Amino acid sequence: MKKSILMMALVIATGSVALAQKEKKYEKLYYKNITQDGEKYSVEVDNAVSTAGETKFKLKITNKTGDYLILKPEECKFTINGKDMMPKEKWLIIKPFGSDFRIINLKGPGYNAVKNYSFSTDGIYTASPNGTVVKADDFKLPPSKNDFVAGDFKCNMDKLSKESDKTEAKFKVVYGGSKVGFIDPLKSAAKMPDGNEYASKYSAGLLGGGGPIMLMKGENDSFTIKWERMEGGRKMDMQLVEMIIQWRETFTEAPLVKEKTTTLNFEFDEAMTEGKK
């Protein structure tokens, strides 16, 4: 009888230890890093962690195309314990063949007890800067009026400096279309009295960096184009002669193209979690 009681006590004790181990709780729960490579973009996840009030991770995306890549986090999806939830973060815009990251954060209770979940990148799109050309009329320097319209692009010359050996013209642009608007100032040129056309030089707009400016509906930016001293003496003195800006393919539009979704499966990293206690 005593032997049976001892055996039963041992079984209960062993079960209690196993249950305690199974229900082990962490203040912070860490996940393994993830890397997935696709045809048009690749993703990397690191620093994934859950606490009692949130789960978050760093999502790095590398754009493998010549198009602009747009991440709309609000269209992406967490699936946790069978429930779908969308994060609320700012859009991420990545230039052709570039990379950037966004911290994805989801608020909610008890996430430090969730050892596995998934995240789907449903909100990834691309848009080509080489889309449909929007025609813009030639623009004289000095102008008879400062504003002009090219399709859904509303433009205004904000500043003009016209000297003998240098001309600079700054333009502000608002895009009001339903697609994606692109402005590539390097596609413009100045037609001079000698009949020749001279390519412009370009100073980056408000968003900084080189390459075309990308605008969604209602967005605005500015750019400055310039020309430096030209051969030809007084006949090519930019302070004295009329210059005509030819916009050529400066303004284009393209639709957003939804890209294939990548599903990221998050797995509990016990070693890291224990190591950071």
Image: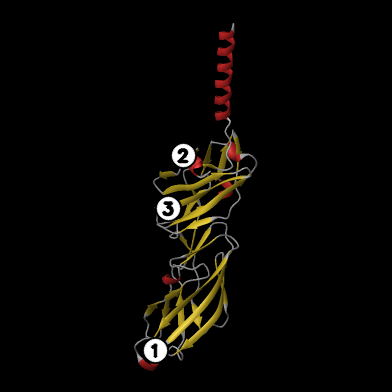
Disc on the earlier residue, 3 or 2 = 3
| Label 3–label 2 contact, CB within 8 A | no
Give the residue drawn at x 50%, y 81%.
140
The answer to whether any part of residue 13 appears in the image is yes
Question: Depth check: 52 or 43 in front?
Answer: 52
Q: Amino acid at mark 2?
A: Ala
Q: Position of residue 119 (x, y in %)?
A: 53, 41
- Can you identify the residue that label 2 sits on? 271
| Spatial CA span between label 2 and label 1 | 72 Å
Quick one: label 3, few (<14), some, or many (20+) residues within 10 Å?
A: many
Q: Position of residue 180 (x, y in %)?
A: 52, 58
Label 3 element class: strand
- Can you identify the residue that label 3 sits on? 62
Q: Residue furthest right?
A: 109
Question: Depth check: 223 or 38 in front?
Answer: 38
Label 2 element class: helix
Quick one: label 2, few (<14), some, or many (20+) residues within 10 Å?
A: few
- Can you identify the residue that label 1 sits on? 236
Q: Amino acid at mark 3?
A: Thr
Nearest to viewer (mark 3 / mark 2): 2
